[in-house]
Image (cartoon, rainbow, N blue to C red):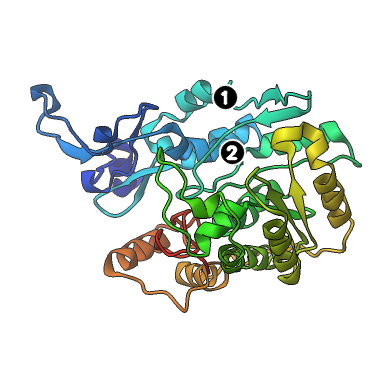
Amino acid sequence: FTSKEIKAFARLDIDASTITWQRVLDTNDRFLRKITVGQAATEKNMSRETQFDIAVASEIMAVLALTTSLADMRERLGKMVVASSKEGVPVTADDLGVTGALTVLMKDAIRPNLMQTLEGTPVFVHAGPFANIAHGNSSILADKIGLKLVGKDGFVVTEAGFGADIGMEKFFNIKCRSSGLVPNCVVLVATVRALKMHGGGPKVTAGQPLPAEYTSENVDLVSAGCANLAKHIENAQLFGLPVVVAINQFTTDTEVELKTVRDIAKGAGAFDAVVSNNWAEGGLGAINLAKAVEEACKQPAEFKFLYDVELSIEEKIEIIAKKVYGADGIEILPEARKKIDLYTKQGFGNLPMCMAKTHLSLSHDPELKGR
């Protein structure tokens, strides 16, 4: 062994300021988002600022959703970077010697939870990484088990969280790259109320009554808000797939409003746009939607990724920002530049991009609605 190898084996030499691994606890206590640890006398002056995350914000949750087997999960867990050394070398869970223990803790969690709807339709509920920070998709294992169970003529519907700008983009560029699965069509869920908000409707506050604009007919707001829907349709088409818009109907929606959404959606390139009432009527309320999806899956499609992973980090960010978010360009701030250079140097430059972004807008600004 060289002296450098002996040093690396004997001491990881972690730079405490680079520790990215947080504690995880599913407790609704926002004071835990920023804490100071290591203040006890026994900690030998190793105090530092850190935080608690909720389980869906943990990298382990993201790993669980992307894993394809127990062995694959063990490998992925071992590669998780928890910090950097003082020389800028990534320190992983494997370096800490905890990969085996992590895998044992997760050996039951890797099994998808089989549940059912009120009508007896089987449903796998498995994994839930946040789409605004992680990839926002349920597990590959649940998808593959579902495909095996339904057979070659069956259908598996899998969810990508937070719209076509975050969850869907990461579903294609991250999850499909890991799974090797190719989707047949995209189903975009829209509501008249949400489109009214994107059309300039008043702010909605949790716990307060909805403003009248959302419970009475207002075609102008709906029409203006459909610009947001049109962009989501455009985003899905970037990947070469047909799009079906599922209009989740509320009792206050009017026929004119629903027709407006259907017409604009189809005019924007959707294969079909169908009103769905399954929340009230169960499966009967979604028959027309199911038929539209079945027809869409028969259409010729040529699935494609948005970018080549071998592009630089900056190029991949720019492609996503311009094509998916509708940005004019990107500006790399000094802190971001520092991290890009570090990650590239550490050998992570040729991975898919997992962009952190608000789910409340196509842009970086949660208050900016519409397109």
Residue at left 11%, top 24%? 40
Question: Is tag 2's residue or tag 1's residue first in the polypeptide sequence?
Answer: 2
The three-letter amino acid code for the residue at tag 2 is Ala
Q: Is residue 238 above or below residue 106?
A: below
Name the residue tied to disc 1.
109
Answer whether residue 167 is visible to the viewer in this image.
no
Residue at left 74%, top 71%? 267
Name the residue tied to disc 2.
65
Gap between marks 2 and 1 measured at Cα: 10 Å
For this rendering, which residue is in front, 48 or 125? 125
Residue 343 in the image: x percent, y percent? 39, 59
Residue 123 in the image: x percent, y percent? 72, 29
- Say few, some or many: other residues with alpha carbon within 10 Å of mark 2 (under 14 / 14 to 19 / 20 or more): many
- Say few, some or many: other residues with alpha carbon within 10 Å of mark 1 (under 14 / 14 to 19 / 20 or more): some
Residue 265 in the image: x percent, y percent? 71, 65
Q: Is residue 300 above or below residue 140?
A: below
Among the 4 quarters of the image, the one containing residue 157: top right
Q: Is residue 186 above or below residue 310?
A: above
Q: Are marks 2 and 1 in contact (CB under 8 Å)?
A: no
For this rendering, which residue is in front, 335 or 10? 335
Answer whether residue 96 is visible to the viewer in this image.
yes
Q: Secondary structure at mark 2?
A: helix
The three-letter amino acid code for the residue at tag 1 is Ala
